[in-house]
Amino acid sequence: MRAPSADFPDAPQAASAGSAAAAATAATDPTGHAARDADRQARLLAWSEDLCRGGSAEIDLHSGRLQPSAGLCRLLGSQAPLPPLSVRAALRQVAAADRARVVQAWRAAQVGQPFELQHRVVLGADGVRMLRQRGLLEAGVDGRTCRGVVVVQDITAQHEAERRIEQLVNVDALTGLPKRAGFLRQLDAALAAARARGGAMVLLAVEVPQVRHAKQSLGFAAADALARALATRLRAAFAATSVVARLGEGDFVVLVPEVGAASVGSVIVACLGALQAALAEPECVGASEVFLAHAVGVARFPADADDAPRLLSAALSALRSGTPGDGAVRVASAALDAAQQRRLELESALHHAIERGEFTLLYLPQLELRSGRPRGVQAMPRWHSATLGTVSPAEFIPVAERSGQVVAIGQWVLRAACAQAAAWQRAGLGELRVQVNISAAQLAQDDLAARVEAALLESGAQPRMLGVALTETLLSADAARAARTLQALRAIGVEIALDDFGTGYANLGMLRTLPIDVIKIDRSYVHEVTAAVADVSMTRAVITLAHSLHMQVLAEGVETDGQLALLVANGCDLMQGGLFSPPVPSAGIDAIWAEGRRLPEVYFQRAERQRTLLLVDDEENILSALRRCLRRGGYRIVTALSAAEGLQRLAESDVDVIVSDQRMPGMTGVEFLRRAKDLCPQTIRMVLSGYTELQSITDAINEGAIYKFLTKPWEDELLRANVDEAFRQKEMQDDNRRLDREVRVANQQLADVNARLQTALAARDEQLSLVEDRGRSALDALFSVPVPLIGLDEEGLIAFANRDAERLLPELRGLVGSYVDGAPSAALRAVAGLVAGQSLDIDLGGRRCRCVSRGVDSLGGSRGRLVALMPAAEPADAEPAAADLRGSVR
């Protein structure tokens, strides 16, 4: 806003309108003009000081006196002008910590060169204020310094705002811990001190993923409460000299300075112990108890980095090199740095891999173990990058999952697999099912089923030609979401497989309720036929569990004949692995189909069932002698020259009786028969040996591994008798098992029949109750009809008489349940001969009535007659009334 011209003589108005008058006045009254100029300048100075919350002063350096302006007086807390002050008195109002700095600034000042500094002043009740001071020294005509000019401004509000901004930038408002920027400054200062002393430092990066999970599941307030609790625990766990900072939701760093170079290892161990103790107990967040899983990355100065940003980056790279929250401790190294760089390169290249057409699919055949034929394939993505070359799935899939690109890759795999399934169907390969893996990110999408259905429709493939595989870890992460998604996929008609079974923590109750068709046994459960008893038992237990839940079993990673033999012997349904074929392109599957390739017939095509004897001995001449002795027994004889070969024969054949030597290289007969008992528990097992190791044989007999012990040399007749007895024992056991199965089946069938009968009886009772209710309702309606009605059954029995009929003929009350032709009243006896559809006029106590008879029909035929009694004076109403009545009875 422009000031009045009287106060600003250089304003345009004054210059244009009154310049001549002003010049004349100045010439005639120069003293008055100067006074007005001085007054105007004083007012301008006062306004300026008020507007900028400032003041000024002139310092006489010869006398050491300071003359404050009105604005400076107000800044110093005085509303009235102050007399000149001594410089010493003015300095007493400067904060004690800042006085030396103010004095030093004035002593170092140069004539004619302004200088500036900030300092605090203490103003009694007003507290401490922050001032910006600008000073200038002037010299007199003699060239000596004679005067100082100082201008001050109150910047307390600005300083507080800057401090607050700095705090927001450097300090986490939620926990009070330093943030990244503030921590880097502290880290840089600590590094400088460590360099000066020649010491070392340890930096721990800690990730607690439960903070992020709490925000997703329990809300922001729960996540904030958990973060504050973690900050409190970490501050309490480490010494006061350590620095704890928060970098993100659940990401913290701990700096341990002042570490001796020789004690870095022991310090790291102590820090990890303190961290483990701090996070061992769960944290209660609301009504939930949160267990604090974590992972740690460790970096050392100067071993891993020599500046603050690189040291922090080294610790975070070590932390991110593994699975979040897996409890691992990873120490930074050059190898980790290279791995981090490799991950960045992979992530960058993955962004363009699909659009550049760098992905392809290989197919791993899946075979039925009953027929040995291919039943389906598993689609496996492969990546050949234009810049990085061929990258294995084990390397790029974790990077894709961490970066979120796995969803796009999974969608590409789904569409490509559906297109290939449709192409194979058109080529006449039958219904070759293609199975694809589903990632956690895909399962988290609510529209996964819609995406699958869209891919099937786009390609023209049938739903039964597609399968999806999910790991049990994904199912346990969010069982409710997984159940909804799997139900939607099952409704489409897609086969669902549980991948890598046995490596996670699947709940058996959840497994029972989810719509899973196939359980894929992890390769760690696929053992050789000669494996330890516990391993073989585990394989059988998994297969039995799956079959009891009415699921098929597919074994992964089958590479040897021994593994296949064990799976066949235990009733596994499907297999995949290098024993038959490695993953091949689609053309390789075409070739396998065209060639009709199968598994060896010995595994899946058993001979016609007959009595089978397995002879095991490491001496071929003994086997020959046994065969000659026993060949007249009429049973099939299978031989093996070692215990391992004997286990292989058990897997290949349905053996009834085993006769084994005791002393064999690699495995004794007792050990072999123990494993045979686990592999084929229904067999009858005998030892034939010339050596008597009583303790081991006795133990084997007591635990049921051996049926009999026979000695060498043997008597042919006695040996044949024992073998025949063993077969009879086996057949008796088979009969008992068969009868037991038949009894169980019969009991189950009987239970099913009883259940069906109970259901039918309950339905019949409910139907009878319904009919009874309907009949009662109909009878009530007939009693209320305003027409005299008499109900007669087919034999003329009076079934009922309604209220109006009893009023007309009171004797009817005692006649219900008797025959109408025996009634005392002649009129009622006349009704007895009235057939359905006829009418008759009768005399009732001097009143002429017309009796109209109508038949009561049902689905089973005639149910009797209904007779209506109406005054003869209204013959026209009789037929309609009867017709209405007939309609209502029906």
Image: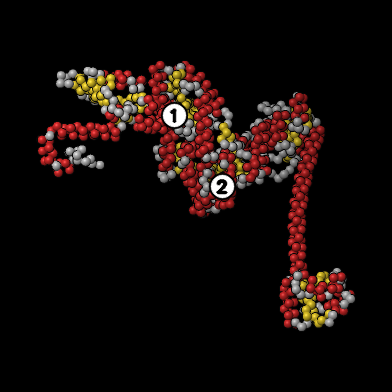
Q: Quadrant of residue 886?
A: bottom right
Query: Who's the residue at 52% across and 21% down the image?
Result: 270
Three-letter code for the amino acid on which mark 2 is drawn: Thr
Query: Who's the residue at 82% across and 78% down the image?
Result: 834
756 shown above or below 633: below
Which callout, 1 or 2, points at the residue further toward the start of the chain? 1
Residue under label 2: 485
Counting labels gives: 2
Three-letter code for the amino acid on which mark 1 is drawn: Pro
From the viewer's perspective, is the residue at label 1 or at label 2 nearer? 1
Label 2: element kind: helix
Label 1: element kind: loop
Query: Could you tell me which quadrant the N terminus lies in?
Result: top left
Residue under label 1: 178
Left or right? Give the position of 573 relative to 124: right
Circle on res. 785: none
Determine the CA span between mark 1 and mark 2. 43 Å
Q: Nearer the viewer, residue 718 or 251?
A: 251
Left or right? Give the position of 829 relative to 855: right
Q: Nearer the viewer, residue 563 or 96?
A: 96
- Residue 469 can be seen, yes or no: yes
Q: Position of residue 779 (x, y in %)?
A: 77, 67
Q: Position of residue 875 (x, y in %)?
A: 75, 82
829 shown above or below 683: below
Q: Position of residue 322 (x, y in %)?
A: 50, 32
Q: Nearer the viewer, residue 154 or 455?
A: 154
